Amino acid sequence: ESTFAMLKPDVASDTHTVDEIKQRIAEAGLSIERERVCRLSRRRCGKFYAEHRTRPFYPALLGFMSSGPVVMLELSGESAIGAWRSLIGPTSTETARKEAPRSLRAMYGSDNTRNAAHGSDSPASAAREIRLMFQK
Ligand code: AMP
């Protein structure tokens, strides 16, 4: 199975943290098939997060996601979608710290928006996100 993973601007510029996260990816039995570092425009973030367009946190989310470089990864492995989502932990950093203290969001996130990492939630989202973010 393949999934789309993204390390967000709160962690992507810190090479030490990115290396630690890659180590956790390897320990989870996942392989990095493709990697791309870039800074996303607001327009591209808007396309990526189109489903959240009407949510109150959407403007803050776009501002944050376009504020600095991100690391985009295509991961593969057994049940890669669930494996990566369990590694990143719950969306809310506070919940992650209580329920999954070793998760990436517990260890590196700061709040509901600045939460270190993204993971696709289904095979259809994974296919869409990989296509959208790795297109030329
Ligand atoms: P998701 O599609 O589930 O990854 O959600 C998109 C992203 O929006 C999350 O990873 C957070 O960065 C942000 N987000 C989700 N829910 C909230 C919230 N209640 N308040 C602020 N930001 C949020």
Image (cartoon, grey):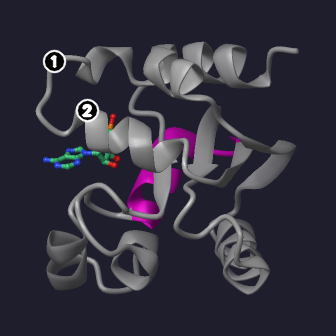
Give the quadrant of ligand 1: top left
For the N terminus, which image quadrant? top right
Q: Which residue is mark 2?
A: 58
Q: Is residue 79 visible?
A: no
Name the one closer to the observer, 66 or 125.
Answer: 66
Three-letter amino acid code of the residue under disc 1: Thr
Q: Position of residue 103 (x, y in %)?
A: 40, 75
Secondary structure state at the residue bearing disc 2: helix
Three-letter amino acid code of the residue under disc 2: Tyr
Q: What is the magenta range?
A: 74-88
Q: Which residue is mark 1?
A: 54
Q: Quadrant of residue 107?
A: bottom left
| Most common secondary structure along the magenta stretch | helix
Q: Residue at x 61, y 36 (%)?
A: 4
| 130 displayed left or right of 34 | left
Q: Is residue 32 visible?
A: yes
Q: Is residue 79 magenta?
A: yes
Q: Position of residue 48 (x, y in %)?
A: 49, 22
Q: Quadrant of residue 11?
A: bottom right
